[in-house]
Image: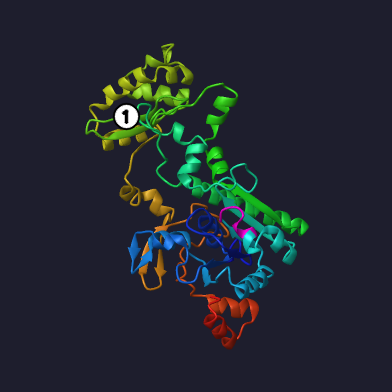
Amino acid sequence: MNKALEGVKVLDFTNVLAGPFCTMNLADFGAEVIKIERPGTGDGSRIFGPFVEKQSGYYIFANRGKRGITLDLKNQKAKEIIYELVKKVDVVVENFKPGVMEKLGFSYEDFKKLNPGLVYCSISGFGQVSPHRDLPSYDIVAQGRAGMMSITGYPDNPPARVGSSLGDVSAGLYGAFGIMLALYHKEKTGEGQLVDVALMDSVFAFIETNIVRHTIGKILPKRVGARHPLSAPFDIYKCKDGQYVIIAVASNPHFNALCDLIGRPDLPKNPKFDEDWHRSDNDVELKAIIEDFLKDYTLDEAVKLFEEHSIPCGPIFTVEQACKDESILARKMLVDIDQPEAGKLTITGNPVKLSQTPPDPEHPAPLLGQDTREVLKEYLGYSDEELDKLKEEKVY
């Protein structure tokens, strides 16, 4: 079956997570991604655990489905090779600190002269045009500065980082989305362009309605724990066995059904609970009522009861439990790959399910430099003798 991005060629200069996550998604849908790494050491994530046969699971996850080559970016002959490769590809992706690619002679303007239709995606902490463009940044810095940490956690506890690298993966997704838009524009006009994505922008966009609560509602959003700041009951509720059930009610019909179920049909008639915003204002009292009902139910019993009555609810799974969830398994969100030297490994699938051109996240990540000779032969016509000489000269 053809893939959505079949025929699209990507030169990947990315490292660790934001950039590799972007190009991983392109590879899942059929793009040929050629990942360039430093000779000897490779991508910085190769030193992150967990390890299997000395290979990083972190690296394998974010670099599946790619071809891997090594080139010393400071070597003049390697630069000449890159300039020739740029002429052969559709997309370049990099996530160096702004200015690094310019110093190497690999900026968008440099590459555009060689390939006017090139789509060039830069992912960085603060973006290419920012007063802070030269500052180093990591995911937690973006989460803090963009406001995410100020609304994450419980009011009486310090601000908390979201439990995954949200800045990296959101920037990677926006990068892939921007590349798709630019490729579509190129298809219509033949014109390439620069895609400029920042971790901070991406996190800022992900705090969604909290922005308009401030800019329009003149409210300063704060940490409210697990509950929703605008709706109730929309929180976690303690059960008989000490575990917590999620109840997520944001409409009057669902609230009426919940009240009937817990034996409190009077609540929707109470001015404190008749509308969602009133329920949110009186959330503490409402939570006590619901937990009084739940004191006779274990988590499993509560979930079963609420599901039977179509009340939005759910358990709070550990990662181990989530990996066994029927929906995760049915939707192939865990896939097996046959990783060279490491054997069969289970990694995350791709959540985008296309009916005609589905993703294929089941190809392994490259060993360091494993495709260098083949790519240079295939793309640039190098002979074995020339490749041997380049190796002796430490070009790759």
In-front residue for pair 306/13? 13
Residue at the image position 40 percent from the left and 29 percent from the top: 227
Determine which residue is flagged by label 1. Answer: 237
In the image, which residues are magenta?
96-102
- Judging from the image, the colouring scheme is rainbow
Q: Position of residue 70 (x, y in %)?
A: 52, 72
Left or right of 332? Residue 390 is right
**Magenta run includes residue 231:** no
Residue in the foreground of this view, choosing between 236 and 134: 134
Can residue 52 be seen here? yes
Tally the numbered discs: 1
Relative to 290, say whether 60 is above or below.
below
Quadrant position of residue 183: bottom right
Q: Is residue 309 visible?
A: no
Q: Is residue 34 left or right of residue 307?
A: right
Q: Nearer the viewer, residue 1 or 82?
A: 82
Could you say where residue 244 lies in the image, as x and y percent from the top left?
30, 34
Question: What amino acid is at disc 1?
Answer: Tyr
Q: State the residue lying farthest toward the bottom.
A: 385
Q: Secondary structure at mark 1?
A: strand
The answer to whether residue 166 is left or right of residue 390 is left
- Farthest residue to the right: give it: 189
| Image spot of residue 309 (x, y percent) | 37, 31
Task: Note whether 396 is above or below 50 in the view shown.
Answer: below
Depth check, front residue: 46 or 248: 46
Q: Quadrant of residue 152?
A: top left
Q: Residues within 10 Å of mark 1 (few under 14, many from 20)?
A: many
Residue 98 counted in the magenta span: yes
Instruction: Return the x and y of residue 318 as percentages of the image width and height.
Output: 31, 45
Which of the image's four quarters has the N terminus?
Answer: bottom right
